[in-house]
Image (tube, rainbow, N blue to C red):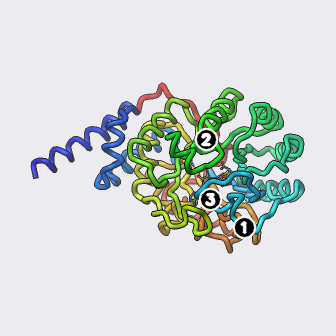
Amino acid sequence: MADQQESGQEVKSLIEKAERTHQLTERELVRLLGDAACTERLAEAADRVRKAYVGDGVHLRGLIEFSNICRQDCMYCGLRRDNPKTERYRLDADTIVDLARKAKGYGYHTVVLQSGEDLYFTTERLCAILREIKKLDLAITLSIGERTREEYAAFREAGADRYLLRIETTDRALYEKLDPGMSWANRDRCLHDLRDLGYEVGTGTLVGLPGQTLGMLARDILYYQELDADMLGIGPLIPNGDTPLGKAEPGDFNLTRRMVSLLRLLLPEANIPATTAMETMVPRGREIILASGANVVMPNVTEGDYRRKYALYPGKICVADTPADCRACMGGRIKAMGRYVAQDKGFRRHRASQAI
Ligand code: SAH
Ligand code: SF4
């Protein structure tokens, strides 16, 4: 009993320290990540920091899944090149620009262009699309995997503002085991190139990879602090039966939630999405995460059967919905939480010096 009280006290003071100083050591992070009993308290602290630093506005980013063709073979992902079951598609330039125009019509101020690593989209082809979308006065986020510094520079020049590239795990050996043929150093290089080129940089962790430890998750958080990441996407592994990790255990929802809360505490200004994968695991999962430190949602703008075919993992929500359904649904849910849909482009606000 005395032990329990002591440990409760320790956790309480660690959360207070994180809320006040936005710093924790690796050992302290492991302590909190490993303590399921502190999930709610951590979420409450993260929610206060979220309100103080980024406010009650929730930024909606319209997600366009424009190709599910991929040259990589990540062991967890349904789009991996060795998965013959994925019915492949690639949208043409006009269709992509048209979806962006519709996204603007739904009131989104950002579009996220996401795909497998599809080299059909050369610099020339992609830059032409970016320039067209830019005419619509939208912020553009790219999420198309690893490219050279020169390509990233060209995309930036053509109008891309942000880039999402999860490091997945900062443990090199685990990364290279689960992403065969890829090098951790190259992924790290990509993130630093993107930073240097003036992108807002988004990265993040796939929680629940087989062999991943709490120490690795703690080091992921410290890596994001060092990188000064602008955006952090965290999601649980959802085993995909058509991949080598089909029989793996799913990532733990509340561990993923603690990870989100700790990220808000340690990177208070960051834009943090409540990811679709969280809601695939738990009904209303995105509301739970929005109340645990997150301030962004990425509703799907992809239309028709392409939604189903962009199957990173099984059980993806809303595959039968239209983009208009998603906009109306998310808007209502955000209001019901006492929050509001932000009306600006939602760039990171630098307020590091402000004490709360
Ligand atoms: N090809 C690009 C973008 C598309 S994949 C890239 O890899 O960066 C986007 C994200 O989906 C990946 O970063 C990965 O973290 C996530 N993902 C893939 N398979 C998943 C699965 N089975 N469960 C949960 N998330 C998955
Ligand atoms: Fe391709 Fe991205 Fe899936 Fe890896 S995670 S197989 S790079 S789509």
First reached walking from the N terminus: tag 2 or tag 3: 3
**Secondary structure beneath label 3:** loop
Q: Is residue 284 above or below residue 74?
A: below
Q: CA distance from mark 2 to mark 1?
A: 30 Å
**Ligand 2 has an atom within 8 Å of the beta carbon of the residue at disc 3:** yes
Q: Are the residues tagged 2 and 3 within 8 Å (C-beta)?
A: no
Query: In the rendering, at what x and y percent does residue 226 appear?
Result: 51, 29
Label annotation for residue 77: 3
Near-viewer residue (74 or 155)? 74
**Secondary structure beneath label 2:** strand
**Secondary structure beneath label 1:** loop
Please tell me which residue is depicted at 58% across the width and 69% down the height of the picture.
241
The answer to whether one can see residue 301 in this image is yes
Q: Is residue 216 left or right of residue 101?
A: left
Query: In the rendering, at what x and y percent does residue 136 appear?
Result: 83, 47
The kind of residue on which mark 1 rests is Pro
Near-viewer residue (64 or 220)? 220
Label annotation for residue 202: 2
Label annotation for residue 84: 1
| Image quadrant containing the C terminus | top left
Query: In the rendering, at what x and y percent does residue 285 appear?
Result: 49, 63
Query: In the rendering, at what x and y percent does residue 307 appear?
Result: 71, 67
**Which of the two discs, 1 and 3, sits closer to the camera?**
1
Report how many numbered discs are placed on residues in the image.
3
